[in-house]
Amino acid sequence: MKTQCPKIILVNKLEDSSKSSSIRISKNANIPFALDPILLLEKVDWLNLGSSYGAFHSFYGELFDSLILDQRDLVVFWPTNTPPDQYWFDILSICDSAGLKLETAFSQEPKPYDLPENLSVSWKRFVEFLLKSIGEELATRISSEEIAVLTNQQESIVLLRNKNRDSLSYSFLVNSDVSIGFSLVPTEHDDIQLPEYSSFVELIENLNNELDLSLFQVNFQNSGMEKIYFNTLRNQQSHFNLINHWLNNYSVN
């Protein structure tokens, strides 16, 4: 199945962070994933990402799951106490080129608080970086078909079949505090490079060598690929109890 593009909604009205806020980082799949610069500081020092890389990595994984896997919209605070600047036009360009649906919900009412100009610039730069990263994720997945999702309490792994003009390849995306094979979080200087395998069997063999797959719940979209998955684990003589893994995960489809 193809990944749908999330909707990005920019707002300029925030409640006092000491009170109950309508713009919060929420894990409820039925409401948008919302970013409040003040509340986010409790999780990630977006003013100095270099000092909180681990926290940002975890946050970005949560954001990725919410937008790409759970198909939730993203509500982002955007300061409007200054005229449109280069960051605003950069945001428009990023969303347009990535196919992201950008909307605004700017309030004309007095705002209980706003960011000082110097913090506004840092926040705009951070939002620009996030949206650029999301766009790169979507561009990476645009020609990919999701095969299965492996999940446990620490991480989730999406198995992908990539359709090129003349060939197929297989890869995976990881959301976790520990990267496997590549870094999920792009930087301004490095592009995401997905590990690619010429066959699904090769992909599963490599994952099985790196991870204890018995700890993952497996949800397949394709019954044929599901059979290949379990046959590969059997042929590789996995160290864990394959029968229990099969009983706990094999679907009837």
Image (cartoon, rainbow, N blue to C red):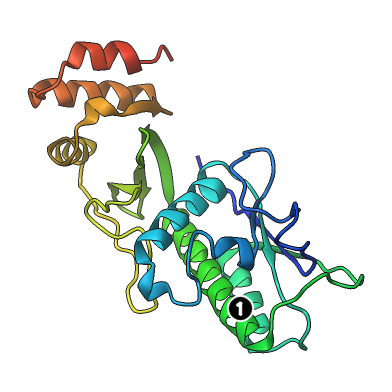
Classify 10 Å Cα crowding around label 1: few (below 14), some (14-19), many (20 and above). Answer: some
Disc 1 marks a residue whose amino acid type is Lys
Nearer to the camera, 224 or 203: 203
Image-based side of 47 in relation to 120, left or right: left
x and y percentages locating residue 129 in the rendered image: 50, 73
Front one among 240 and 177: 177
Helix, strand or loop at label 1? It is helix
Q: Is residue 252 visible?
A: yes
**In the picture provided, is 240 more to the left or to the right than 101?**
left
Q: In this view of the protein, can residue 3 be seen by the observer?
A: no
The residue that mark 1 highlights is 124
**Where on the picture, by quarter, is residue 122?**
bottom right
Residue drawn at x 24%, y 50% is 180
Image quarter of residue 23: bottom right
Task: Quarter of the image for the C terminus: give it.
Answer: top left
Residue lying farthest right? 109
State the residue in front, 142 or 204.
Answer: 204
Q: Picture coordinates of residue 52 (x, y %)?
A: 39, 67
Image height of 56 relative to 151, above or below: below
Task: Give the image quarter of residue 230.
Answer: top left
Q: Residue at x 51, y 64 (%)?
A: 135
The total number of labels drawn is 1
Tell me where residue 42 appears, x and y as whole percent. 53, 60
Does 45 sit above or below residue 153? below
In the shown orientation, is residue 164 left or right of residue 70?
left
Q: Residue at x 62, y 69 (%)?
A: 95
The spot of residue 18 in percent (x, y) is 71, 59
Is 82 displayed left or right of 6 in the figure?
right
